[in-house]
Image (spheres, rainbow, N blue to C red):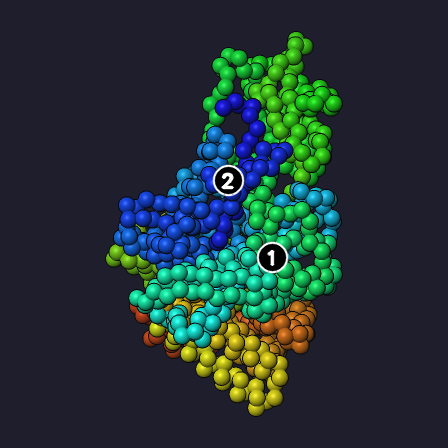
């Protein structure tokens, strides 16, 4: 391979139904074709009795004849501990292992087309993928042989590709990305070639597969009327249902261009009985089925627009991505509801891969293996270090460089465009060999430049590198975090590290304390740091996405209650997590994040959870009826429909549908949170009462012992809290309440005898402390401090006794077993 050959920027759309690859060389975009000549590779894997692996179209051929050993739809299971069986070879595989097989196939397709087996790539993931899912995607890429990848959110990739292929219109865009397994919607803003992500929303369990599931339900109804009974809850019917689902997918595609579609299957095994299936589905029937799902997706779009102050009709462009978006009803409703036209000339099936490839160019992630020098060392010119953007929206960017071989005495540098129509002035190097030159790019393409130097004697010499290229196009601003991330604490609250919408990459540290004594013994973990994702202040309502575990055997010494732990969390642009914990007293750092998988859950656990939620919903419905709260009644009616949908999925899970089980698991958390919101609203009068009580308790202390600034601050906080309560902005009201309490507490402790009074209260509860021996010692020290009137020492004793107050074990378990507190 020649050293000056164009780069290969690889973009991969690893889809639920199909996967695609695009290559960008800085100027031209190419969509890679597989060995069957198609740009779409079905995300399907078959393993036969000899453990041979087939991927894509070749595997798809066995969906009908050998469904037991042919697997698809595993993307929605990424990051879970569910294993998919291949009974012919007596094997089972994790979802990421099957995704790795798809990535290996795509990687080989690139090699077949270009002669280069890439080592680096950008892979797309849904915008609302959680941390354990992105980690599983990275692991799949590693198993496929990639040495480095970057992740990009699918709707962001689509927007980059749309901006590259069409004249960009300044203003808000929306990317409506409905794939096989997930729905993502992103709001973006384009200004002078810079694309900024404003916000995300979506549903990780809404996609073309759900259209297929409804189609199967309709087929089952028709078969039932003909005396053929196939039950989702019956494991013996699982393979028959799988064959029906694949046939439903074909019918779905046919109905995008025809008024009816036949479904014919011969020799379908229904509990040991062979039956033939021959039914017809009309477009009208199909549209009636999927209309609620389409409206659900559009409601999410409107919710995102409203959250950012956009009215219907304000969008400059609506970009549709994903196979299901070719559905005529969807396009009609999207145009009517959102009031925006679609981008034209865009391929919804390959747009994500194209955007990923462009992003690879933006970050300079060349997929080619590291190149050996194409020339003998003696033939190379003086070496220069260069820094420049691989892609930029600026037509006149700067190239910054430095001569790193001063012995060659290059005193000036000149850059010339390869078309010879532009050349920079000869720019003198600084004393350290540095230089900065503004270059001129050709619009919307890759521009190549040559680099030459001038020696002190006036002679000209080609530098190393002799050429470099910069592409002009739309560039991406910092992507926002889709969901808030924090650490669960032992009292079942969340210490929030990163709020939703924070720009990535991001890093933050907090100092927390151990909630209990930690001993350096045993093989298990001594301290657990649960990492959660979600928008709730209670940890059990948030999604556990990772755990940092500190093994007892790894600790140098025991840690008392209240020992300081410095916790650092970091997210890169693709949402991949790094975490570390430093034990301050021993200066030990632990950085192994474990359990980034969702454990399996039993049918019984799902049934019990559903029953509890239904009981809460019924109680709230009765209360809403008695109080004539029509708003609550409407919301609870929607939740009842959601619970019924979850029960249907639980039935399918009982029959072996793992995807349906994951839908139930996540749906339970969502319904739990929505019920909690309704329950919390019943507490508004109580919250107002707490505000008035807190203000009355604290304003007197601030008036007597606070400064003028503190007196003004407590009044401002009171009025701000009242405004927040009137607007039903609970978090803000709680924040202002905390401020009132903090101001009052600070003033109280300036009063005479305050620390004596508090000491007596905590000393009376010393017998309940987590470390009785230490608590007894502290009480004795406190009494001595009181005797000699040492207020400073007494304050320190009280603070240490606070740290020894016992943990509520029930709340600790709800907080995912956290061993930490934040004081």
Q: Which mark is residue 614?
A: none
For marks 2 and 1, the one nearer the N-term is 2
Q: Which mark is residue 37?
A: 2
Instruction: Kindly state the secondary structure of the residue where label 2 is placed.
Output: loop
- Say which residue label 1 marks: 257
Q: Residue at x 69, y 27 (%)?
A: 437
Q: Residues within 10 Å of mark 1 (few under 14, many from 20)?
A: few
Give the number of marks: 2
Q: Residue at x 67, y 34 (%)?
A: 445
Place of residue 726 in the rendered image (x, y in percent of width and height, measured from the top left): 67, 77
Which quadrant holds residue 462?
top right
Q: Looking at the picture, does residue 537 appear above or below residue 464?
A: below
Q: Residue at x 67, y 62 (%)?
A: 332
Q: Residues within 10 Å of mark 2 (few under 14, many from 20)?
A: few
Which quadrant holds residue 813?
bottom left
Answer left or right for 775 relative to 181. left
Circles 2 and 1 in contact, beta carbons < 8 Å = no
Answer left or right for 294 relative to 768. right
Q: Is residue 455 shown to the viewer in this render?
A: yes
Q: CA distance from mark 2 to mark 1?
A: 23 Å
Place of residue 313 in the rendered image (x, y in percent of width and height, measured from the top left): 74, 61
């Amino acid at each position: 391979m020649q050293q000056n050959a164009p780069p290969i920027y690889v973009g991969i759309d690893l889809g639920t139904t199909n996967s695609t690859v695009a290559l960008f060389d800085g100027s031209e975009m190419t969509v890679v074709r597989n060995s069957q000549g198609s740009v779409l590779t079905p995300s399907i894997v078959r393993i036969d009795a000899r453990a041979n692996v087939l991927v894509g179209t070749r595997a798809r051929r066995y969906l009908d004849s050998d469904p037991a050993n042919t697997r698809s739809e595993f993307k929605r299971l990424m990051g879970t501990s569910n294993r998919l069986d291949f009974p012919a070879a007596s094997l089972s595989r994790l979802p990421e292992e099957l995704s790795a097989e798809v990535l290996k196939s795509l990687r080989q397709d690139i090699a077949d087309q270009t002669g280069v087996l890439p080592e680096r790539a950008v892979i797309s993931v849904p915008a609302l993928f959680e941390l354990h899912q992105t980690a599983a995607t990275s692991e799949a890429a590693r198993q496929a042989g990639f040495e480095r990848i970057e992740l990009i959110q699918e709707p962001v990739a689509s927007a980059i590709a749309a901006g590259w292929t069409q004249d960009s219109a300044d203003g808000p865009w929306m990317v409506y990305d409905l794939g096989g397994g997930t729905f993502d919607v992103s709001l973006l803003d384009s200004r002078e070639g810079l694309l900024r992500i404003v916000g995300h929303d979506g549903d990780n369990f809404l996609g073309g597969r759900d259209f297929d599931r409804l189609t199967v339900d309709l087929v089952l109804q028709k078969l039932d009327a003909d005396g053929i009974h196939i039950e989702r809850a019956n494991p013996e019917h699982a393979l028959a249902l799988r064959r029906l689902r694949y046939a439903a997918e074909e019918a779905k595609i046919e109905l995008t261009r025809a008024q009816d579609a036949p479904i014919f299957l011969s020799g379908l095994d229904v509990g040991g009985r062979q039956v033939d299936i021959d039914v017809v589905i009309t477009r009208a029937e199909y549209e009636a089925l999927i209309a609620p799902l389409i409206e659900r997706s559009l409601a999410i779009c409107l919710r995102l627009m409203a959250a950012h102050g956009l009215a219907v009709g304000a969008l400059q462009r609506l970009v549709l991505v994903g196979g299901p978006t070719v559905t005529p009803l969807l396009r009609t409703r999207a145009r009517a509801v959102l009031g925006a036209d679609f981008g034209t000339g865009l391929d919804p099936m390959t747009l994500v891969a194209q955007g990923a490839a462009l992003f690879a160019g933006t970050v300079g992630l060349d997929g080619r293996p590291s190149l050996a020098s194409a020339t003998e060392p003696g033939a190379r010119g003086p070496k220069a270090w260069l820094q420049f953007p691989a892609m930029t929206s600026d037509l006149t960017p700067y190239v910054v460089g430095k001569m790193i071989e001063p012995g060659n005495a290059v005193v000036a540098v000149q850059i010339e465009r390869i078309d010879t129509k532009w050349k920079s002035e000869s720019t003198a190097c600084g004393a350290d060999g540095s230089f900065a030159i503004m270059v001129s790019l050709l619009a919307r393409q890759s521009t190549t430049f040559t680099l030459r130097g001038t020696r002190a004697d006036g002679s000209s010499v080609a530098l190393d590198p002799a050429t470099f290229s910069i592409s002009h196009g739309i560039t991406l601003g910092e992507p926002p975090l889709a969901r808030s991330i924090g650490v669960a604490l032992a009292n079942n609250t969340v210490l929030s590290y990163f709020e939703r919408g924070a720009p990535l990459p991001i890093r933050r540290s907090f100092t927390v304390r151990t909630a209990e004594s930690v001993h350096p013994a045993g093989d298990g973990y001594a301290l657990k740091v649960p990492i959660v994702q979600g928008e709730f202040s209670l940890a059990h309502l948030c999604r556990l996405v990772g755990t940092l575990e500190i093994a007892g055997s790894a600790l140098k010494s025991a840690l008392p209650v209240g020992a300081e732990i410095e916790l650092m969390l970091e997210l890169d642009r693709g949402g991949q997590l790094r975490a570390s914990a430093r034990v301050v007293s021993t200066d030990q750092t632990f950085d192994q994040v474990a359990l980034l998988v969702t454990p399996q859950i039993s049918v019984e656990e799902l049934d019990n959870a559903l029953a509890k939620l239904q009981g809460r919903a019924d109680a709230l419905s009765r209360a809403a009826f008695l109080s004539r709260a029509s708003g609550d009644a409407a919301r609870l009616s929607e939740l009842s429909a959601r619970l019924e949908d979850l029960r249907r999925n639980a039935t399918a899970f009982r029959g072996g549908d793992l995807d349906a089980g994951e839908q139930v698991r996540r749906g339970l958390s969502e319904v739990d949170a929505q019920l909690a919101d309704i329950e919390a609203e019943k507490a508004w009068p109580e919250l107002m009462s707490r505000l008035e009580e807190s203000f009355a308790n604290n304003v007197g202390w601030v008036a007597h012992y606070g400064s003028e600034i503190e007196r003004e601050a407590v009044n401002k906080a009171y009025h701000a809290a009242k405004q927040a309560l009137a607007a039903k902005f609970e978090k803000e009201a709680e924040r202002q309440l905390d401020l009132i309490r903090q101001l009052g507490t600070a003033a109280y402790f300036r009063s005479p005898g305050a620390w004596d009074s508090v000491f007596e209260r905590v000393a009376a509860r010393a017998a309940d402390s987590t470390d009785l021996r230490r608590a007894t010692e502290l009480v004795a020290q406190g009494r001595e401090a009181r005797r000699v009137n040492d207020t400073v020492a007494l304050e320190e004793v009280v603070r240490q006794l606070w740290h020894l107050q016992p943990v509520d074990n029930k709340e600790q378990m709800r907080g995912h077993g956290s061993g930490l507190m934040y004081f």
